[in-house]
Amino acid sequence: MLSYFGMDIHRGQAMTTPDGLVLDVFEFSDEEAFLKKNPAATNDICGMLEEVVAGSVDVAALLAGKMRSVLYRQRPGRHEPPVIHFDNEHSRKFTVLEIVADDAPGLLYRISRVISGQGCDVELVLIATEGSRAVDVLHVMKGGAKLSDSEQSALRLELERALEAGHEAD
């Protein structure tokens, strides 16, 4: 949703409590000066956020339109393949998933849709943007346990497809 309004996310954290409460904290900049040009837009952003959380907004459709307009303005650049790494040793309870990929509007949304689609739960997310690359570290589990090798392979394949699909649009 922040991407839709032209915000550039620099870093963030998301945590889930045992009873299912989610807390997201993002540090972002307004490169397009959207808020400066539209001082009352804070209310629009908050309203849209409430609609997104309630499930009454099709985020995929919003981002698809945004991606078309962003890609139209962007010059072709160098595409780096994503790096996806799983670690079952670092945490007693979770599989640690690290993704390094080209930054793009809606990247975190695409990643989270794939993880959810694979039936995984996310306990903690740490994100950062370094230049044109996004670095996302997620603590994930499936069915209350770390991901098995086959679950990691399936998730990797779907993440690679989703991340490459973002580049095929350009």
Image (cartoon, rainbow, N blue to C red):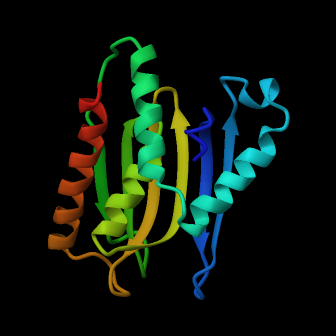
Between 159 and 169, the residue placed more toward the observer is 169
Residue 142 sits in quarter: bottom left
Residue at the (27%, 70%) spot, across then down? 118
Residue at the (36%, 38%) spot, across then down? 101
Left or right of residue 109: residue 84: left
Give above or below for 94 relative to 44.
Answer: below
Whether residue 103 can be seen here = no
Left or right of residue 16: residue 163: left
Residue at the (48%, 52%) spot, across then down? 59
Percent position of residue 136, x then y: 46, 50
Percent position of residue 110, x then y: 38, 50
Percent position of residue 129, x then y: 53, 37
Percent position of residue 113, x then y: 37, 59
Between 119 and 66, the residue placed more toward the observer is 66
Residue 119 sits in quarter: bottom left
Residue at the (52%, 32%) spot, across then down? 130
Q: Quadrant of the C terminus?
A: top left
Q: Residue furthest right?
A: 39
